[in-house]
Image: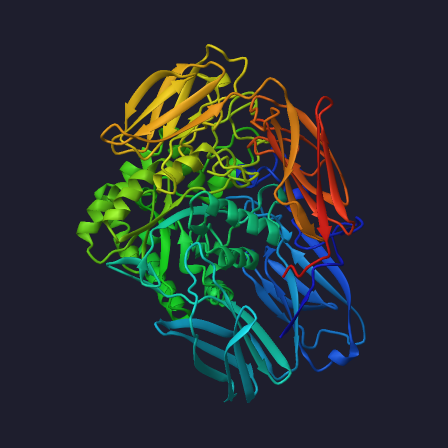
Amino acid sequence: MKAAAFNDGWFYKHLGSEETATPAALPHDAMLKEARSSLSPGGINTGWYEGHDYLYTKTFDIPQEYEGKKIILEFEGVYHNAEVILNGKKAAFRPYGYTNFYVDTEGCLNFGQANEIQVIARNSDQPNSRWYSGAGIYRPVVMWISDQQRILLNGVKIRTVSLHPAVIEIRIMTEGKGAVNVSVFDGGKDVFSHSAFTTGELVMKAEIPNARLWEPGKGELYTCRVTFGTDEETVTFGIRTISYGSDGLCINGKRVILRGACIHHDNGLLGACAYPEAEERKVRILMENGYNALRSAHNPCSKAFLNACDRQGMLVMDEYVDAWYIHKTEYDYVRYFEDWWREDLKDMVDKDYNHPSVILYSTGNEVSETAQRKGIQLTKDMTEYLHTLDDRPVTCGINIFFNFLSSIGFGVYNDKKARKEVKKAGKPKAVGSEFFNNLAGLLGDNTMKLGATLHGCDVKTRGAFAAMDIAGYNYGILRYCHDLKKYPDRLILGSETFCKDAYAFWELAKKNPRIIGDFVWAGMDYLGEVGIGAWEYKDYAPDFSHGPGWISAGSGRIDLTGRPLAEAAYTRVAFEREKGPVIAVQPVNHTGEKHSPSAWKMTNALESWSFRGCEGYRAEIEVYARAASVELLINGKSVGKKVLKNTCRTHFHTAYENGEIMAISYDHSGKEIARSSLMTAGEETVLKATPDQTETAQGRLCFIRLKYTDLNGVIKPLERHRVRVTVTGGQLTALGSACPYNSYGWLSDTTDTYFGEALAIVMAGSGGEIHLSAADGIHTGETRIKITERSDLE
């Protein structure tokens, strides 16, 4: 079917209001523009944003010659309880806010004249999510057009049969019978062509000569073009196999250890909007920081995200949902789950099938239903149903300790209790998952890890683990060795883990193939669930209550603007992506001060030695290295040497002084392995505007980092200013910093900086270049980005 973008010309307003509708180019997140207040029922889950219902409208023409054709609208994501009305006729309803769905327009369109489409997106039923969901039509919409005799949507599915020789199976589903022509291209070169007759379903095999294999970090892709009558479909795919068993998880027959990160669906300052450039950037940054796998927590991801993973060679665990039949919030998906889970899973698999990046599915996250007989059977049913759709392995992330606690009635969510707490405008008490998260935040990460070793935790998880292909352990690393012995056929995946456990996991996984991977919470900071992963000081967060003003979780090895933190450097060293040594320093201007508590933060150290004005203060320094020992020097003088045993992280404590700090790593014989250093920034301060790219196309997003540095480009984290940005040749789409506390949002032209940095996101216009200027009243910075002609963004 022919695809036509359907993203322009939309208007939106609050449902039922008399207000004038506002233009809304898709993708569009309506929630991002709402007020934030203590009266928001979503509270800390949604970043205190208010929830409303929205009406989207669009008027469009359908040519007369389209009469008799098949026309289908695909909505990739509408949050949530979406209703689609065409020319006054209700054409579709889809409750899940993260599933792509299709609207058959037959009998609803007026050909040769104007048509009106209305989409209702509901989000006033708060609370309905444990994180910032966004609202409205936040992913793209496509109109599919074909003759009645056609290739069905998602009707071309390709899988790899063998590697030597490289053989793929092409399955084609059609409406009607006739000749089908198939061609496979390697770039522009035709490497396979064949014609056959179909009566509705056709399966053929194709041998690909000199095949380039898709594998982690190497996104080798082919295209398959299928024609049937007047219809044509082009599919991108990769040649790769997946196997799993006692030898671990293998891609193309070679064992791969998943160095994974959990990510939510939002794109930071852009809210829930799934812009292709933002998704591409997110994947690139995470890959640059040593991750080879991402978990779409806790819902199906966008097509743009999967496309980016395909191109870059990033592995994906695509997850379905956060709750089954036990509520986590009062108005979550539980009320629809039982009636819709099969259709949801089918649509997820149809979307994922041809993406080589997708290597396994997850049916849920921390679903305490898995401790019950009914839930164990549901685990089995969902696993088996997915196997009828695809042969990829299936898992489910289970919080082992919390499964046990909930099974004995401790911390169980209750609607009545939750409603009572929501009415408290001050400090409502946490219930359900929020209660457990707060408990872990206060008592530390060992609470969940040690609790998971209890015998009762084994009893309350073994039934569900037996009903999936790979057992998903949330915070269960202390069970790994015990369970490998007790359950000799079990494969273990750290489906959610703490950053500080990266080294221990890696060493275990190298020795035990049945430990297939680890997914840290979280790879990149995200909106909502505010403060859960933040170590914040009073100068950036007036209070630690996580009340209004707090906006993000603060839980990411990569911050909200895409800047890698020291925890990312630790992870790279732990996973042997680099040997180190890497030097990281906790903010010297805050040494000894209290910060907001969190079990999900390993450290708030910065890769910086620029703390002028703090001379003589106590400095707490961390060094990450794959070595036998590490020595630390300041201005050429040794301040100590530490032995590294069963770790790649060590600490030094000394007085701060300006100049050079150096770390030297040694092997067991005392021979130097490597050295690295940090310099104090010079006294001069400049404001730099540095774009991710120097050239872009019309309609694309550009990411421009604002940072205070010295003349040599060394970051100055203690510089904090209000910066105003002006743009010509484009539209300032978002502006802000990574601070988890932000009372004013990202939609104005002014922002506070956070440890010396902020981010501007600009959509390129139709002119020859973007010109961005930033100023704080003292310093100014500017950059220019060349704009080329618009290219195909789909």
Instruction: Judge whether residue 697 can be spotted in this image.
Output: yes
Estimate the x, y position of residue 731 in percent, counting from the top left: 74, 44
Going by the picture, which residue comes out furthest to the front?
A: 671
| Residue located 73% across and 74% down the image | 109
Locate residue 114 relative to residue 302 in the image: left or right. right
Q: Decide if residue 274 is in sight here.
A: no
- Give the percent coordinates (x, y) of residue 789: 73, 57
Total label count?
Answer: 0
> In the image, 69: left or right of 293?
right
User: Which image quadrant is residue 215 in?
Assistant: bottom left
Residue at the top extreme? 616
Q: How is the image coloured?
A: rainbow
Vertical arrangement, residue 191 with respect to residue 348, above or below: below
Between 38 and 743, which is closer to the camera in this rendering?
743
Does residue 131 appear to the left or right of 779 in the view shown? Answer: left
- Residue 154 lies, in percent from the top left, at 53, 72
Q: Residue at x 63, y 19 (%)?
A: 684
Relative vertical location of residue 307 with respect to residue 397 in this rendering, above or below: below
The quarter of the rendered structure image containing the N terminus is: bottom right
- Image coordinates of residue 638 in percent, x first then y, are 35, 16
Q: Where 592 falls versus 33 (above or below)?
A: above
**Placement of the C terminus among the 4 image quadrants:** bottom right
Q: Where is residue 386, by image quadrant?
A: bottom left
